[in-house]
Image (cartoon, grey):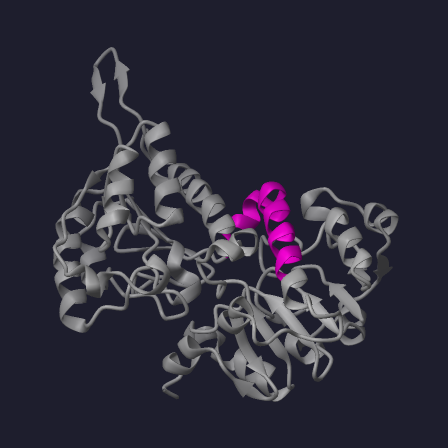
């Protein structure tokens, strides 16, 4: 069987799904590996490096997609404007695809249906459960670490203010104020980075244990009293809230938004559309030139006026909907992701390279389409099929 590694084409995406060190491991497992020419340029890995590891270098994405039994990617398939064809259409019918698919996000529903119609066995790297056996495969946590760090740096670059307190001959300049909504891996890394830069940080999460972790990093916790049986879902992730609780959370967030210079939105429910916590009306009351980093945009976004893939300005507020923030710190993000992917593939084919282990808990949790059927519950719910 052949594994194919295409070059990513999403804007500013410099990561790649495999590195020479993981290519060698796939070959040791008995796979052939084909890598599209220049796929590793964004992480400073040459075609010669891949060739020395045993990969076959191919010149076009069509060859990688159509001649591979298994395609490994970083981001979801998109329309290739240079080739005038969608990446899904280049896949071999009945093949296997492993990547970040974000299947619940409305803008990805058509792509998921395309995968179903081509009988692709598709697995999403954001569906890996939070269990000890899956830690080495947990690309969502790996990329969240990168995202939380890089998002704060991107916000600092956009913000027309100092982050730390600055003393001058004519007085003190106050530090920038950060509001971090969601204290998972992204949020905690954002808190730590904002604090290192000298910002004042507030944090809000519906889970008490996440609030405790935010407090331990020096953030001032915004209290939101909610029964924890509603707040905490499977695996310790945030639960999906009913409308009345979301509205109460919005009322708690509103005054904090008006006081903030930078807002990092990272509240997610695994596999489902992200909760809309910030409305257009709330944005209109924020400070001019403040910044919103909507990290949850891959699952629909926490801000209802975020534009996916864009950095826009609305009501005087800069709103970031960039979907591949880790791709802007590609060397470390690529190394983490390539190794997460290897351990996932090792587990997926642990019964032999010709047999998917669809009974495995990790595989079941990340399965999106198989045998012309959509299995992902979050996608089905978002599509109105559940």
- Residue at 33% across, 58% down: 236
Q: Residue at x 51, y 52 (%)?
A: 135
- Rendered image quadrant of residue 99: bottom right
Q: Which residues are magenta?
A: 324-344
User: Where's the C terminus, which quadrant?
Assistant: bottom left
**Vertically, is 37 above or below 44?**
below
Q: Is residue 67 above or below residue 288?
A: below
In the image, 286: left or right of 195?
left
Residue 6 among magenta residues: no
Tell me if residue 327 is in the magenta stretch: yes
Is 181 placed above or below 191 here? below
Quarter of the N terminus within the rendering = bottom right
List x then y, in percent, for residue 267: 32, 57
Residue at image point 49% right, 82% down: 375
Residue 225 quadrant? bottom left
Q: Where residue 329 appears, x then y in whole percent? A: 56, 43
- Tell me residue 284's x, y (percent): 20, 56
Residue 313 visible in the snapshot? yes
Residue most extreme to the top:
169
Q: Quadrant of residue 159?
A: top left
300 over 168 or under it: above or below = below
Q: Is residue 163 left or right of residue 138?
A: left
Magenta stretch, main secondary structure class: helix
Q: How many marks?
A: 0
Asked whether the viewer can see residue 14, the reply is no
Residue 375 in the figure: left or right of residue 300: right
Query: At x 78% / y 60%, what residue is drawn?
Result: 29
Q: Position of residue 19 (x, y in %)?
A: 72, 49
Front residue (pair 286, 229) = 229
């Amino acid at each position: 069987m052949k594994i194919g590694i295409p070059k990513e084409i999403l804007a500013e995406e410099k990561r790649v799904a495999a590195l020479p060190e993981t290519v060698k491991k796939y070959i040791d497992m008995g796979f052939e590996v084909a890598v599209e020419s220049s796929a590793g340029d964004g992480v400073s890995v040459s075609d010669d490096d891949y060739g020395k590891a045993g990969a076959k270098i191919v010149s076009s994405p069509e060859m990688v997609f159509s001649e591979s039994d298994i395609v490994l990617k970083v981001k979801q398939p998109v329309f290739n404007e240079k080739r005038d064809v969608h990446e899904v259409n280049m896949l071999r019918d009945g093949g296997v695809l492993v990547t970040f698919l974000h299947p619940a996000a409305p803008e990805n529903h058509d792509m998921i249906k395309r995968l179903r119609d081509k009988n692709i066995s598709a697995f999403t790297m954001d569906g890996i459960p939070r269990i000890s056996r899956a830690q080495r495969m947990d690309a969502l946590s790996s990329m969240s670490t990168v995202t939380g760090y890089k998002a704060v740096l991107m916000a600092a670059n956009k913000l027309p203010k100092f982050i730390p307190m600055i003393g001058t001959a004519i007085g003190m300049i106050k530090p920038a104020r950060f509001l971090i909504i969601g204290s998972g891996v992204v949020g905690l890394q954002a808190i730590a980075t904002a604090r290192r830069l000298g910002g004042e940080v507030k944090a809000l999460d519906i889970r008490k244990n996440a609030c405790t972790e935010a407090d331990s990093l020096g953030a001032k916790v915004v209290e939101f009293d909610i029964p924890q049986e509603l707040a905490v879902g499977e695996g310790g992730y945030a639960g999906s809230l009913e409308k009345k609780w979301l509205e109460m959370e919005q009322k708690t967030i509103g005054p904090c938004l008006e006081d903030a210079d930078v807002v990092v939105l990272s509240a997610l429910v695994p596999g489902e559309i992200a909760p809309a916590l910030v409305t257009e009306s709330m944005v209109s009351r924020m400070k001019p030139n403040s910044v919103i980093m909507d990290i949850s945009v891959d699952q629909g976004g926490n801000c209802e006026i975020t534009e996916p893939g864009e950095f826009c300005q609305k009501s005087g507020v800069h709103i970031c909907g960039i979907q591949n923030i880790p791709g802007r710190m590609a060397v470390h993000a690529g190394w983490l992701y390539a190794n997460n992917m290897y351990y996932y593939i090792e587990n997926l084919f642990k019964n032999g390279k010709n047999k998917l282990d669809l009974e495995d808990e990790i595989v079941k949790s990340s399965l999106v389409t198989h045998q012309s059927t959509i299995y992902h519950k979050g996608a089905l719910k978002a599509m109105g099929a559940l």
